[in-house]
Image (cartoon, helix red, strand yellow):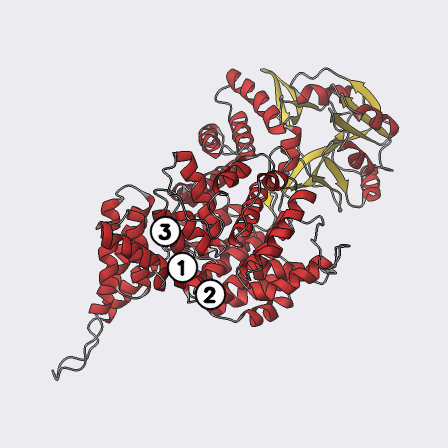
Amino acid sequence: MLLGVHIIVRNEEDMLPECLDSIRGIADELIVVDTGSTDGTVDIALRYGARVIKAEWEDNFSSARNLALEHARTIWVLVLDADERLRGDLQSLRQGLRKADSSAYRLRMEHLLDASNTGRSMTSEAVRLFRADRGYSYYGEIHEQLVRVRETEGGSIMMDVDGPLCAGTPHIAHIGYMPDVLRRKSKAERNLRVISRQLTKRPNDPFCLYNYGVTLCQLGNAEEAAAAFDKALVYTPLTAPYRPTLVRDYATALLALSRNGEAAELLRGETLRYPDYPDLYMLQGNSLSASGMLLEAKEAYETALEAGAKPHSYISENGAGSYLAQLRLASVLQRTGEADAALLAYEALLGAKPGWEEALSAWADYLQQLGVSDQEIRQKLSGFTGNEGAEPNKLMARVLSRIGANSMALPLWREALQSKSASAVDGPIAIKLTLSDIRGFADCLIGTGQYAEAASQIRAWLQAVHPYAEEEPSNETLQLGMDWALCRWNDGVQISREELAAVLGGGSVAREAEQLNGWLPAGQGPRNKIAKEQELAAAVRWLDTAVSRGMLRLAHRLAGGFYGLKPYFETLLYDHGYVDAAAEQMLDRFEKEGRLTGEQAFRLGELLYLKKLYNEGLSLFDSSVESDKSGVYAQRARLGAAAACLQLAIEALQPDEYSGTRNWDGSWSEPDRVKLQEALLRVEWMGWQTSWNGRQRRRVNGGTAEADFLMHDR
């Protein structure tokens, strides 16, 4: 027999059928090693004609793999897992094995990382196809490696088995790294248990340390993962095949922790060692960009594109050497003020990858920054949204919603959603949508003042599609519950306890809403309350949501209901784009109390800086540093003060009018001015200024009529 397929399983009834379907017609023998399934896994394997071998699970993958090899009756073996699917021209795979000139082959693997429309994935290569009659075996309790034993005068040594990439299109699609699969199968917890036991025996084993770090990343513990990667790098030989990926994962963990300088320093040396690895250059660009070194980041992204144009065998994120690097490059060109180059980059990127939502959103946001009208933005984007049924309308609606173009996005939402709904036109659209779709449509309804309809639709969705009865509601689901309650209160409705329970269930959002329900509806006078720390934190979350939705009268009442909440109201107004109203509130407080917090002083200083009042802004930046010496706003204020000083110096070096002196030509200051302007750009690129999204930017630029009462009706 030519080819056998070997699979290890345990409680894989949801995954196994699709795996076995993918190998129909190519396997002469199917061996399934079951390590203790209690569901229908074994019955499924038997229905597909598998020879099932029972084995006790010993937290050792090599043991189970080698057991399957002992029972092999074929010349060749293909090793799969239940969460993998074989793709490509499989009959050519069999034909190629009949005249193979190698005893082992690597297969390309695609690891899907999420279910988003971008289809984020990693690619790698692994020896999965090899001859069963060459004495190969597996070694290692986890992340097992195929080895052959070689006898020497000094004894037996194990050598890794390698081979060329399998010719043609066959490859393996792996879904086991998708977050919902990891969570449902508890694979990361299992791996952590096995690797931790290995490390008690071999604490400085670099491969164990590396895999320990990977597992910690999967569990969301970036801090400990970075420490594990750092230690692994110390002990890993330069020739180790996994070392480039270790560097990549270490840099990724450092960036997740905002340790941008450390990541940049690591990659500065490692890109020299692996000059053809595009992922390292893209991560280098990310670290430099986050540190404000945009010219250097631009060069790194360009080098990533050059490296990505050449074939390589590194474990790599798809797009790291192409479209992802192109998007980051367009963002850098945008920040450095190279508008024409940035716009051309966005168009070229979407011409090659139409319908990519992240790129569409970035381009739309930049066009809105440049003052392009909503109608023109829609026209520019319309040629790059794809042509699959109603999806382009929904995609365009999402993109326009993100930049605050609510009036233009709302008809698109209605058209896209009604095309999928069997409900009456006037009834709630209770259909199965992604939470981002639900949020997008609700945001548009709220943004255009249609609070009653928004509340009705959200309630239908919460009850019919994403009920609060689920054990762990997502943050988006919780946010929708807050939006529903705020819409009701904004329309002056006091919600009954029964309705709160019916819509929000019995979780934290319902408890907080019940506490606020007594006095937030219109007509109720706020009753100032000295809140506990936990209550105050909850009130801040509700206040933040109300301000972000433009429900300022409701937010104003909320801010007056808890002692100590008003300063949060003032800073949230600023952060959500109501800069003039926030300034009025903060200055009024300063007049009454004679002091400002570090956060307030920074925001007022930034506002004055934006209005080109650099002297006054400098004074407030200095005040912020004094009030918040070691906090995040102190660092931002220091950079703001540096920028203000540079602006003042540039103004001072402006050539005066001709003074009548024969020898003076007005050009003496030009070299200094150029140096100062370059330094100013560097400071402004360091990310100290508030970043407003499209909706908030509209308010900054004058669209703040809802805030007029705060400034004029007091």
Q: Earlier in the sequence, mark 2 or mark 1?
A: 2
Q: Residue at x 74, y 55 (%)?
A: 420
Residue 554 badge: none
Residue behind mark 3: 571
Q: Is residue 676 left or right of residue 122?
A: left
Q: What's under tag 3, amino acid-wise?
A: Thr
Q: Secondary structure at mark 3?
A: helix
Is residue 289 in view? no
Q: Is residue 61 left or right of residue 290?
A: right
On the image, the x and y values in percent for residue 366 come to: 49, 64
Is residue 557 in view? yes
Q: Earlier in the sequence, mark 3 or mark 2?
A: 2
> Which quadrant holds the N terminus?
top right
Q: Are marks 1 and 3 in contact (CB under 8 Å)?
A: no
Q: CA distance from mark 2 to mark 1?
A: 17 Å
Foreground residue, 674 or 401?
Answer: 401
From the image, state whether disc 3 or disc 2 is nearer to you: 3
Q: Secondary structure at mark 1?
A: loop
Q: What's under tag 2, amino acid-wise?
A: Gln
Foreground residue, 303 or 596?
Answer: 596
Q: Are marks 3 and 2 in contact (CB under 8 Å)?
A: no
Q: Is residue 71 left or right of residue 378?
A: right
On the image, the x and y values in percent for residue 442 come to: 60, 54
On the image, the x and y values in percent for residue 216 come to: 53, 30
Residue behind mark 1: 578
Q: Earlier in the sequence, mark 1 or mark 3?
A: 3
Q: CA distance from mark 1 to mark 3?
A: 9 Å
Residue behind mark 2: 369
Q: What's under tag 1, amino acid-wise?
A: Tyr
